[in-house]
């Protein structure tokens, strides 16, 4: 099942909680995955903990115009996030509304997910798709159009054990060769069909494209150096499998 950058972008949504009192607004990214008979919203666990039932899910509707629904409106009463026990991944099932059923048409499918616990090749370009700083999603004027931002980079490491930015507990990540930006938390990272250089030559991928992970956050120090930390896709699959097995008919 081929996966282009445009198809991948359709699965990506803006997650938003407006500022209230002294609390700052929360902007982040999620994406949709369809399992047999069940639709899930996936994001970073640390972001999901900040998203109550009134958080909005915004995506491009007809003509690219913004459409928004609350989490409460997209999920059944009492639905809650299911968190991976070790990785920064959370999923919630969306069902019980016409809006949720419509979103299923935009979702990634199981063949779009890698399953092995591994870092992608450093030769291949990777594409993160999300809403940095809310760009491409937050309302500006009456003609509010939505378009997530895509950003290309490459893997800069194999699998590494690093401390999570939220819990300070060790977890498995791989690193991208550029930093992430606030609002990209929870954004999916894809390996898409492309031409790429390897060993001094130009190669063309024969793969259909798939998700390799999601954005956790930025690894930085006081010199100004920054690198993006990515949760491998295997943990997304584990979180989905756990939630799917526990779901009620």
Image (cartoon, helix red, strand yellow):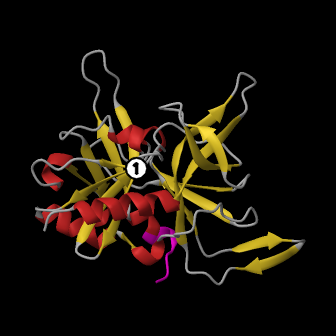
Q: Which residue is mark 1?
A: 84
User: Percent x, y for residue 81?
Assistant: 27, 47
Which residue does the image show at 48% across and 31% down from the upper left?
167
User: Looking at the rendering, which quadrant does residue 238 occupy?
Assistant: bottom left
Q: What secondary structure is found at the residue carrying circle 1? A: loop
- In the rendered image, is residue 222 in sight? yes
Question: Which segment is the magenta one?
Answer: 1-7
Please say if 130 is above or below 192. Answer: above
Give how far across and how far down residue 187 sits, in percent: 47, 51
Between residue 63 and residue 212, name the one nearer to us: 212
Mark 1, other Cα within 10 Å: few <14 / some 14–19 / many ≥20: many
Residue 4 colored magenta?
yes
Q: Is residue 108 magenta?
A: no
Residue drawn at x 16%, y 62% is 95
Residue at figure coordinates x 58%, y 71% from the top left = 192
Classify 133 as above or below 69: above
The front one of 6 and 8 is 8
Left or right relative to 20: residue 174: right
Left or right for 96, reference 240: left
């Amino acid at each position: 099942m081929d996966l282009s950058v445009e198809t991948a972008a359709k699965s990506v949504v803006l997650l938003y909680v407006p500022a209230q009192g002294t609390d700052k607004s929360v902007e982040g990214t999620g994406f949709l995955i369809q399992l047999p008979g069940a639709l899930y919203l996936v994001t970073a666990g640390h972001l999901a903990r900040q998203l109550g039932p009134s958080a909005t899910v915004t995506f491009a509707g007809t003509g690219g115009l913004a459409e928004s629904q609350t989490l409460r409106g997209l999920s059944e009463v009492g639905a809650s996030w299911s968190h991976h026990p070790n990785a920064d991944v959370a999923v919630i099932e969306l069902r019980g509304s016409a809006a949720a059923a419509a979103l299923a048409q935009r979702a990634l499918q199981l063949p779009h997910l890698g399953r092995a616990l591994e870092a992608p090749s450093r030769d291949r370009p990777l594409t993160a798709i999300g809403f940095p700083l809310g760009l491409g999603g937050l309302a500006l004027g009456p003609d509010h159009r939505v378009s997530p931002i895509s950003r290309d980079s490459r893997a800069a490491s194999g699998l590494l054990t690093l401390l999570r930015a939220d819990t300070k507990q060790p977890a498995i990540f791989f690193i991208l060769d550029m930093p992430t930006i606030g609002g990209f938390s929870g954004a999916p990272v894809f390996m898409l069909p492309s031409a790429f250089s390897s060993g001094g030559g130009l190669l063309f991928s024969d793969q259909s494209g798939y998700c390799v992970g999601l954005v956790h956050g930025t690894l930085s120090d006081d010199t100004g150096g920054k690198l993006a930390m990515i949760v491998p896709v295997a943990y997304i699959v584990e979180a989905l499998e756990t939630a799917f097995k526990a779901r009620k008919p």
